[in-house]
Image (spheres, coloured by chain):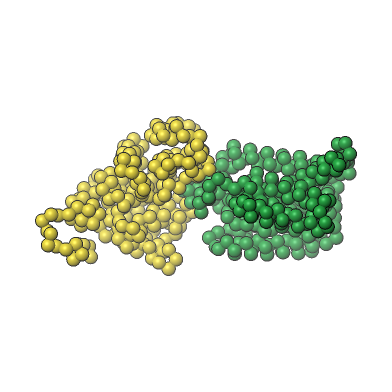
Amino acid sequence: MTSEILQLLISGISQGCLYGLVALGFVLIYKATEMVNFAQGELMMLGAFVAYTFLDILQWPFYWAVLATIFVMAVFGVVIERVFMRRMIGEPPFAALMLTIGLGFLLRAVAGAIWGSDPRSITTPYGGGIFSIGDAVLGYENIAIVIGTAILCLLLYLFLRYTRVGIAMQAASQNQLAAYYVGIPVKRVFSLVWAISAMIAAVAGILIAPVSLVDPQLGFIGVKAFAAAIVGGFGSLPGAIIGGLIVGVAEQFAGLYLPPGFADTSAYVILLLVLIARPEGLFSTMQKKKV
Amino acid sequence: MSEGMANSTPMLELKNIETYYGPIMAIRGVSLQVFEGQVVSILGANGAGKTTVLKTISGAIDPQKGQVIFEGKEIQAWDPDRVARLGIAHVPEGREVFPFLNVEKNLLMGAYTRKDSGVKADLAMIYDYFPVLAEKKEQAAGFLSGGQQQMLAIGRALMLRPKLMLLDEPSLGLSPALVAEIAAIIVRLRHEQGVTIVLVEQNARMALDIGDFGYVMELGRVVMEDTCERLKESSDVQEFYLGMKDEGVREVRRWKQRKTWR
């Protein structure tokens, strides 16, 4: 019994990390630019396909392929910002929202056209190995997800807290006008935010590929991640990760202990419960943000 | 002061600026000149277009017509961060600080454009000007009082080592004691740092006391311009902006009196 709970907890955490990473992408872009990027899940899907291309088609060594994927996705993020999103500055929020939804459709279609809609899997050096704690069995892929997420969060934290550009990014998201007046190039900061979000999506794509087959529909995980972001307070970076973990763990337990169907809806049940009990999310920022 | 400088070229010049907010023309052809070392005050009632003039200078709003010339360069319609890099620091109305960053990080963000090594020394200087900021340097700026936030906004602008400072309503919503304190700081800045200042104020007395040259704006136009000394003498400014009343002319009804510029 305890090992069963342990097992569920562990798989829930690793699944939750993935939700958390996608949620992190949502929140980063929202905080900085006040736009919601509904194509965040599709960016992750694209990251997984790009990784597949480098690893299994081009046969690059694993670590080089990872770096190349992150780089390609960062450039892609900047391109999206420069070509599409920059025109949305000053437009009504729903315009930007519709644009990103459309972008999501486009990316799914393009990915289907390039890589086909058959599910693919990528080969990793850590694939297939298992690790057991008592009766609980843990795939190396799942451990990689947790470690990868932890490293990414640490890097992001250090970047935002201690680098000049990171602090400028916080400044621009807290008060755009004042950021402009002190000479922070706000538009370039937006590009950077998109680059970082796309890089996070790339990492999420690389991490998810070994545990879930890669196909153009992979991006729909973004819907659950969006729920996770709201649970976490939509605007809090640690909240995004914790929201992801809550959703991931709850999903695993609902899958085993509740009637069929509850696993997939549990994310939204939690979302509803949180919105009723604490409409501002679990980790809302302490004071209302000035626009 | 401006008399002697009349022949030299101005540091900042606005030529016939017209700026719109959507379909509304907020500034209808404003021209003004600011010479190095001057404090230039812009007075006017609510909605006269004072803030819009500053925003047009710093690039937050693009003018439809006219030129903004700073040190010989035409800078109208530049992005605000590029204008800031020329050494123009805008302290906007309403104490726009970065609420979740602490005081020290707010100040350091003011030096974002600088690459030189004097940032530490300047930080010490700001703390010397505003000792209260030194006490609260670890606190999030959002938790400061209104007056402290205003000081932080001014201090942050100084961290840019500006050649020109645009101050928008620094006295707004502050107690008379704080207004006097801010005014004293502005005078000190001008003498010790040699900063040229454009001051927008509704508090006409403060603006005329510390300014060298003044412009009076009404409905998007400059209706009077003169040295602050002479503006203070003007009966219109006394009546409409300083609230003084000539006891002798009780018969002249206020609403019948015409301003000389109409």
Look at 18% across and 51% down and name the residue there: B233
| Quadrant including the C terminus of chain B | bottom left
Q: Is residue B82 visible?
A: no
Q: Could you say which is closer to the camera, residue A75 or residue B70?
A: A75
Count how many numbered circles sit on residues in the image.
0
Question: Does residue B189 appear left or right of residue A230 in this picture?
Answer: left
Residue A59 location, x and y as percent?
Answer: 85, 48
Q: Could you say which is closer to the camera, residue A35 or residue A266?
A: A266
Image quarter for residue A85? bottom right
The colour applied to the residues of chain B in this rendering is yellow
Up the image or down, B112 lies above or below B82; here it is: above
| Quadrant including the N terminus of chain B | top left
Question: Does residue B71 appear left or right of residue B262 in this picture?
Answer: right
Q: Could you say which is closer to the camera, residue B157 or residue B96?
A: B96
Residue B114 location, x and y as percent?
Answer: 49, 40
Look at 43% across and 47% down and name the residue there: B95
Residue furthest to the left: B248
Q: Is residue B59 visible?
A: yes
Look at 39% across and 53% down and name the residue there: B54
Look at 30% across and 43% down and name the residue there: B176
The colour applied to the residues of chain A in this rendering is green
Residue B56 location, x and y as percent?
Answer: 41, 56
Residue A219 location, x and y as percent?
Answer: 75, 57
Up the image or down, B119 lies above or below A49; here it is: above
